[in-house]
Amino acid sequence: ETGVTQSPTHLIKTRGQQVTLRCSSQSGHNTVSWYQQALGQGPQFIFQYYREEENGRGNFPPRFSGLQFPNYSSELNVNALELDDSALYLCASRERGGAGTQYFGPGTRLLVL
Amino acid sequence: AQRVTQPEKLLSVFKGAPVELKCNYSYSGSPELFWYVQYSRQRLQLLLRHISRESIKGFTADLNKGETSFHLKKPFAQEEDSAMYYCALSPIETSGSRLTFGEGTQLTVNP
């Protein structure tokens, strides 16, 4: 059991709305990354947070934003939802340094209508 | 730009047969290469990474910098190996984060 949890498991939104997805990192992990996985595709890196600051970002527009809290839980916020935002959103946590293995959560499936 | 290509979306073999899942990459710097696996109804998990040079569940992968490949191999496939396999790359300075994934290969091992 890796210990990374995500909520909600799935949700439905309409175009133009805003959504917040949540992730609880595995105990002791201070780095969290978010990925978007469209149907039939591999995960795509959105951004990474370390000690509450963004320290890496993939090719996603600014309407994708995040937060990391002192307890290392995190949020992914998406504004002005578009149909193409429909995907599985994965959170992954890891220890900074060391073996660096990322542990993935089960994901949140978002459907935008 | 970095890119990972897995040319086979589907691969089917019989139990006991050798299996090879292909992965090619492009990256201008020094990459670290990984294989991740997702079994049915389970979360994505690390199978192996090239720097550890470990063999996990009988799988091995050799990084070929000349051919920019990182193919995953197993000499004798088992039914429990049926899963989705993703090859991934990260800049070596990020220690395994900021992964770029391929599109994945669905492996089915038939009895």
Image (cartoon, helix red, strand yellow):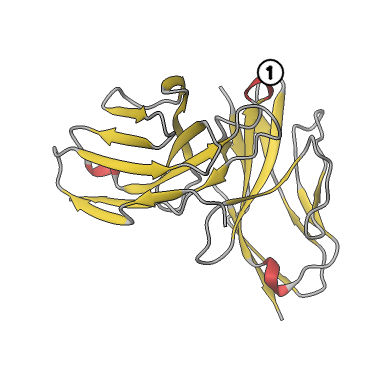
Residue A3: x percent and y percent? Answer: 51, 51
Q: Chain letter for mark 1, please.
A: B
Q: Which residue is mark 1?
A: B29
Q: Quadrant of residue B62?
A: top right
Q: Amino acid at mark 1?
A: Gly
Residue at position x 48%, y 34% in the image = A32
Residue B42: x percent and y percent? Answer: 53, 62
Residue A33: x percent and y percent? Answer: 47, 34
Camera-side residue of B59 and A25:
A25
Camera-side residue of B37 and B73:
B37
When the figure is inspected, residue A32 is found, relative to residue B87, above or below; the finding is above
When the figure is inspected, residue A75 is found, relative to residue A107, above or below; the finding is above
Label 1 Cα crowd, 10 Å radius (few <14 / some 14-19 / many 20+): few
Residue B50: x percent and y percent? Answer: 77, 38
Identify the element where label 1 is drawn.
loop
When the figure is inspected, residue B10 is found, relative to residue B71, above or below; the finding is below
Q: Is residue A61 left or right of residue A79?
A: right
Number of labels in the image equals 1
Q: Quadrant of residue B19?
A: bottom right
Q: Quadrant of the N terminus of chain A?
A: bottom right
Residue at position x 78%, y 68% in the image = B77
